[in-house]
Image: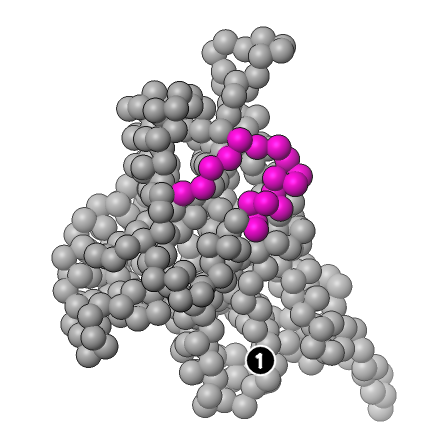
Amino acid sequence: MTLGIILLNLGGPDSLQAVRPFLYNLFSDRQIIRLGPSFMQKPLAWLISTIRSKKTEQYYKLIGGKSPILDITKTQAKALEEALNENFPPPSPPPQGGRVREGVAEINFKVFIGMRYWSPFIEDIIPEIYGKGIRKVIALSLYPQYSVATSGSSISKLKEVLSDYQMETVYISSWHAHPLYIEALVDVIKKGIESFAVNAERRTENAEPEVHVLFSAHSLPQKIIDEGDPYADQTIETIEEITKRIPLKWHLSYQSKSGPVQWLEPSTEDKIKELAGEGVKNLLVVPISFISDHIETLYEIDILYKKLAESLGINLKRADSLNTHPTFIKALKEIVISELKKTGSKS
């Protein structure tokens, strides 16, 4: 049996020409932000994407002319597929006249990618999966902390598409406190903190530079949280699991807000200014809700916030994104295997 895994993610423009239509798709989603009454959502999304596209294109030019998220997600998918099939190898052909033994050896994993706002779109990948004869899929959201605006939106779209197909589907919508995910984060944070000591101009054996950690999560409209969305609470729970394993002087902020509504606070920009006023000199930014590099890490943190920090006398560095960190790939593998066991699949 071939079991399909579909990795659900945001997606990103793969060229400068794709920026405006990507933004249109993003702002058309009322689960992210409601632009007036429902009948005005798409017209307003068109207007906002048209106005913002030229400025946003400039940001993408600074990070290579496109989002790297698809390339990274492809690499994650390949690594996960290989890791899963190490434990669950494809079956060998049966002897002549014989039968393949049921059980572990009969499971073969094939990992696919379904993006919400740019290709490969969820609605395009499901026909491909079905055409390969796959009739069971595990949908794994690549957003660690659940929100209706991220995992919820992708899963809703997937369910809409699947309504036309006879496929058994299991949904994994949150894994914000998985031990291996936390372990991978602890590793990149430790390495990030160590990088300050390596580059410190004045360092003695007993005088390590004091480093504060700023967990920067993607912002959401406050209204979504007020309606019961668990995203902010799960973000705190992720941080609490990290601090059980490594002592930190930490802070939390939110980045990447857009649109004329109240967003989660404090913003990362405001928090950096506040920390500068408190005399913080070394700041490690950890993109806590992001598992892949994209414009929010490569432009907002590495360029925009770093420049702001330098102007305020702060030495700002960023912890590496998890991308294809070996422990992170192991986390994704364990999440899938655990779900298989819970749903009673042969494993």
Judging depth in this view, the residue of 228 and 5 nearest the camera is 228
* Picture residue at 71% right of the left edge, 73% below the top: 342
Count of all numbered marks drawn on residues in the image? 1
Q: Is residue 69 above or below residue 209?
A: below
Quadrant where the N terminus is found in the figure: bottom right
Residue tagged 1: 169
Region in magenta: 237-253
* Picture residue at 39% right of the left edge, 24% below the top: 278
Residue 101 visible to an observer of this rendering: yes
**Where in the figure is residue 114, as x and y percent of width and height?**
45, 69
Residue 170 drawn in magenta: no
Amino acid residing under circle 1: Thr
Residue 347, by quadrant, is: bottom right
* Picture residue at 65% right of the left edge, 66% below the top: 336
Q: Is residue 50 above or below residue 42?
A: above
Residue 105 visible to an observer of this rendering: no
* Picture residue at 69% right of the left edge, 77% below the top: 343
**Where in the figure is residue 15, as x and y percent of width and height?**
29, 56
Judging depth in this view, the residue of 242 and 286 nearest the camera is 242
Residue 242 drawn in magenta: yes
Within 10 Å of disc 1 (Cα), the crowding (few <14, some 14-19, many 20+) is: some
**Where in the figure is residue 316, as x and y percent of width and height?**
41, 28
Q: Residue furthest front?
A: 226
Q: Is residue 165 above or below residue 300?
A: below
Judging depth in this view, the residue of 63 and 283 nearest the camera is 283
**Where in the figure is residue 104, as x and y percent of width and height?**
79, 73
